[in-house]
Image: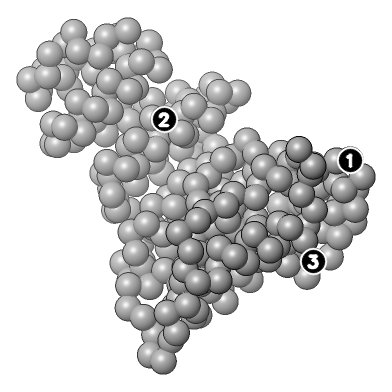
């Protein structure tokens, strides 16, 4: 198949934004498949902040609807885009999208539905991309988003995910606990599933981070009152971690909620 040039990427992306289309086209794979010649040309272009932003907004990089950290990191490496440069572009997009009412439950006065649609689209994707480039300031923005109840839960959930992707083993246990049962709880069931599936699985090369995830989830399940959550999350975690599967804490949690101990065994 002939590789698609940037013009084709832009046309397809704009088609998505044109009339509230239901078609979702993820162009990240297209960039990762560029030839070395095309890649080198874009490496030069992306040294210019304006061109990098143009590529996010018009070149399809904001078509992403969920995190693919391995591919997103490969994009940074392939095109030589630094965390600092990427974050600067994303935060500009986020501030402008937020000013137009992106992510807000209440639409600003005199706003146009199409403007809100695009603002929401851009904001959602930009928050996802922060999961592979955030520094301390951007992480604080993500925390502020999590606690902002004027924003839709979907945006707050994405902020949780991006924050956790940028969280190291040392910080993981305390932060994840706050997201699951503490003061930053938004939709705990979704956060549990994210933690024991996407986050745990994507941390294959970081055993300490995995240990911190297991410790946090195990501790919160011990306090969790929703039996269905415990039942589901326990099964997922036990399949991934023998340490958790064989732990006395797990046994006590299952007994507390009268969940059969043999359920979910490896």
Tell which circle, 3 or 1, labels the residue nearer the N-terminal end. 1
Mark 3 to mark 2: distance in Å?
35 Å
Residue at 9 percent across and 25 percent down: it is 257
Tell which circle, 3 or 2, labels the residue nearer the N-terminal end. 3
Residue at 16 percent across and 32 percent down: it is 228
For label 2, the crowd category at 10 Å Cα-Cα, with few meaning under 14, some 14 to 19 and many 20 or more, is some
Which one is in front in this view, the residue at disc 3 or the one at disc 2? 3
22 vs 210: above or below: below
Residue 94 visible in rendering: no
Q: Is mark 3 on a helix, strand or loop?
A: helix
Asked if marks 3 and 2 touch (Cβ < 8 Å), the reply is: no
Mark 3 to mark 1: distance in Å?
19 Å
Residue at 44 percent across and 84 percent down: it is 112
Q: Is mark 2 on a helix, strand or loop?
A: helix
Q: Is mark 1 on a helix, strand or loop?
A: helix
* Residue at the limit of the structure toward the bottom, as seen here: 110
Residue 31 position within the rendered picture, expressed as x and y whole percent measured from the top left: 74, 46
Q: Name the residue under label 2.
A: 197
Answer with the quarter of the image where residue 108 lies: bottom left
Is residue 40 found left or right of 78 in the rendered image? right
Q: What number is the disc on residue 36?
A: 1
66 vs 210: above or below: below
Residue 22 position within the rendered picture, expressed as x and y whole percent measured from the top left: 45, 59
Answer with the quarter of the image where residue 144 lies: bottom left
* Residue at the limit of the structure toward the left, as seen here: 258
Residue at 71 percent across and 52 percent down: it is 83
- Nearer-the-camera pick, 45 or 22: 22
- Nearer-the-camera pick, 138 or 31: 31
For label 1, the crowd category at 10 Å Cα-Cα, with few meaning under 14, some 14 to 19 and many 20 or more, is few
Q: Name the residue under label 3.
A: 51
Residue 197 position within the rendered picture, expressed as x and y whole percent measured from the top left: 41, 30
Mark 2 to mark 1: distance in Å?
34 Å
């Amino acid at each position: 198949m002939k590789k698609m040039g940037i013009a084709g990427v832009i046309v397809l992306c704009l088609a998505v934004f044109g009339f509230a289309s239901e078609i979702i086209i993820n162009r990240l794979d297209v960039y990762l498949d560029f030839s070395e010649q095309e890649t080198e040309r874009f490496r030069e272009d992306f040294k210019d902040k304006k061109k990098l932003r143009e590529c996010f907004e018009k070149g399809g990089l904001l078509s992403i609807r969920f995190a693919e950290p391995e591919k997103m990191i490969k994009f940074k490496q392939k095109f030589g885009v630094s965390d600092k440069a990427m974050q600067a572009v994303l935060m500009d997009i986020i501030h402008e999208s937020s000013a137009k009412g992106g992510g807000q439950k209440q639409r600003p006065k005199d706003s146009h539905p199409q403007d809100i649609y695009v603002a929401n689209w851009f904001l959602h994707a930009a928050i996802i991309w922060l999961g592979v480039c955030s520094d301390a300031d951007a992480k604080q923005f993500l925390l502020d988003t999590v606690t902002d109840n004027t924003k839709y839960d979907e945006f707050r959930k994405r902020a949780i995910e991006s924050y956790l992707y940028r969280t190291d083993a040392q910080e993981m246990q305390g932060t994840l606990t706050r997201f699951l049962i503490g003061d930053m709880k938004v939709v705990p069931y979704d956060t549990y599933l994210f933690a024991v599936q996407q986050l745990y699985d994507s941390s294959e090369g970081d055993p300490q981070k995995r240990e911190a995830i297991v410790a946090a989830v195990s501790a919160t399940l011990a306090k969790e009152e929703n039996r269905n959550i415990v039942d589901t999350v326990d099964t997922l975690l036990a399949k991934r971690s023998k340490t958790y599967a064989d732990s006395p804490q797990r046994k006590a949690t299952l007994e507390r909620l009268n969940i059969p101990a043999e359920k979910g065994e490896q």
